[in-house]
Amino acid sequence: MRFKELVAPVYYRRKREDVLSELPELIENEDWCSLSPEEELAYEDAIQSKNIMAARRVSWNVGDVRRSTKARRLCEIVRESKEDGRKVLVFSYFLDTLNKVIQSLGENCYGPINGSVSPQRRQQVIDEFDKAPAGSVLVSQIQSGGTGLNIQSASVVIICEPQFKPSVENQAVARAYRMGQVRNVMVHRLLCLDSIDERIVEILEDKQRIFDAFADESLAAKEGFGIEEKEYSNIIEKEIERINARRDANVAGVLIETNVAKATSIGDGKGSFVADSGKGPSAAFSDEMSHIEKTVVPKGEDGLRSTSKGVSVTRRIREYPQPRGGFLNPKLFEVVQLDGGISELASYENVVPGVVGIAVDYMVRFCAGSSVFDSFAISRKGAFCVGKVDLFNKLASEIAGLDDKSIANAIKLAGFDVAYRMGPRAYRPVEEIKPDSQTLENVRIMVKRGCAFLNECGPKILDGLTFEGGYTDIVSNGDGDFLTPDTLWDFKVSKNPPNSRQTLQLLMYWRMGLHSTHTEYQQVRQLGIFNPRMNRIYRLPVGCISEEIIAEVEKDVIGYRA
């Protein structure tokens, strides 16, 4: 601290907020992806050969880009951006990665901009991009397009891999986040768990802390440090050690999966937490998880529990190629438009769409009669994973209805979900989520729409649907939304109609329910999607689904044996 005071008069660090206070908000996200077995093999080959540049292309270096988890996440972000009326910048250090981005997105892409593109051609590409519709993507090599360009027509920035110098990423973000930008700018950094991406992030975070010990915080702090070439060999050696240690621990993963499954079915066998000990649901959950912590294999250095058996429903859908139009074409669904629509909502929300959607879903469950602990059960598990159970309990105890404080707390609780679904490394402090008045009002309206929908199509039989007995070695987890007397429902908070991935998800839930131990699914006669943002119902009688489609999905997608 003494040194910091001494250098302060001569070491001046200019802060962006001091000189550009009129800029909109900058929202930064780390999008952590789990590696598939194919990606793990390619990555481990790169590490064992001590090729750090090949290792940095983790996930992008699979043979078929459709099987890249980073590519799938990139496509999801682009779709979400199109729904929100935004355009996207994509940066990578590697030309090969940019080519795979273009291959994934097709005709929506402009560029690429790289070192061989003349200044005149660069400007021509940018001019064409500026005139392009929402959902368009400009791809660029980060060292070529990350400086000297003004691209305020884009408000989403995707960085395909972490850079060795934070200043390189900051310059790329500044292509969109600069004077003249009128929308908040969303930054997505694509990262892979259990890979060199984690190591790079950790090293840079450590250097940031050291730098901040000597000077006040500002964006300029990241200009002066990075990872030097002499550090590459140490990074590789640490990754080799981690990979070898993980191989030694793989056998014990099955025990972890069994015990965690036990914790998620305390009480009534339907995934809700019943406090038969008299301590209340939160205490019962914490007691059980504490017991599991003592009886399973110790956690790795990142705190993650992972097994090689099965994936989630949503991940399986991303992995499996559907026929043209999808297994369950969305056009088959009957559409019912309820009173009001998307035009009644504010066009801008300062919280990412995924968190808003989770908050709406869980608040509808709460307002429909479930306890706050049951409604936010997944969030509670996420809070446990990051050691924030006390904060979860405090926020949950203050939820009483649809007042501003309750809704703000619900949005923060939704931020815990990622810690459970993707692991603690993907978590960002929920205290940093600060929904503005427009976001709060949008959530309030959508929750009211959800409650009106359940009154119209209900009553609700179950929510927070699970499928014990219906999971397989291929699909080992997944949870649905609502069951009414004859319909299995999924909530989708979106500006767009359902797509084939969402309808396949619903079809999988139905078939998994029929194979499960829960008899309630036997009464399902219709599949339905409710979108509270559009206030629209989509419904399809299960009798309209061909036996051939059902057989293929059960056998090849879910993994049931004949």
Image: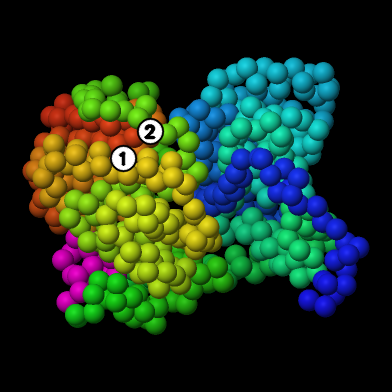
Can you tell which mark lies on residue 445?
Answer: 1
Q: Is residue 559 left or right of residue 105?
A: left
Query: Can residue 283 be seen by looking at this rendering?
Result: yes
Q: Indicate whether 332 appears above or below 14.
A: above
Mark 1 and mark 2 in contact? Answer it, CB < 8 Å: yes
Asked if the magenta segment contains residue 96, the reply would be no
Q: Amino acid at mark 2?
A: Leu
Instruction: Please name the residue shown 28% across and 32% down the image.
Output: 535
Chief SS of the magenta region: loop
Instruction: Please name the residue shown 70% across and 49% down the image.
Output: 17
- Callout 1 secondary element: helix
Residue 270 percent location from the top left of the image: 19, 60
Q: Which residues are magenta?
A: 262-276
Which image quadrant is residue 154 in? top right
- Mark 1 burial class by Cα count in 10 Å: few <14, some 14-19, many 20+: some
Residue 194 percent location from the top left of the image: 57, 60
442 vs 522, nearest the viewer: 442
Which image quadrant is residue 405 in? bottom left
Q: Quadrant of the N terminus?
A: bottom right
Q: Amino acid at mark 1?
A: Ile
- Callout 2 secondary element: loop
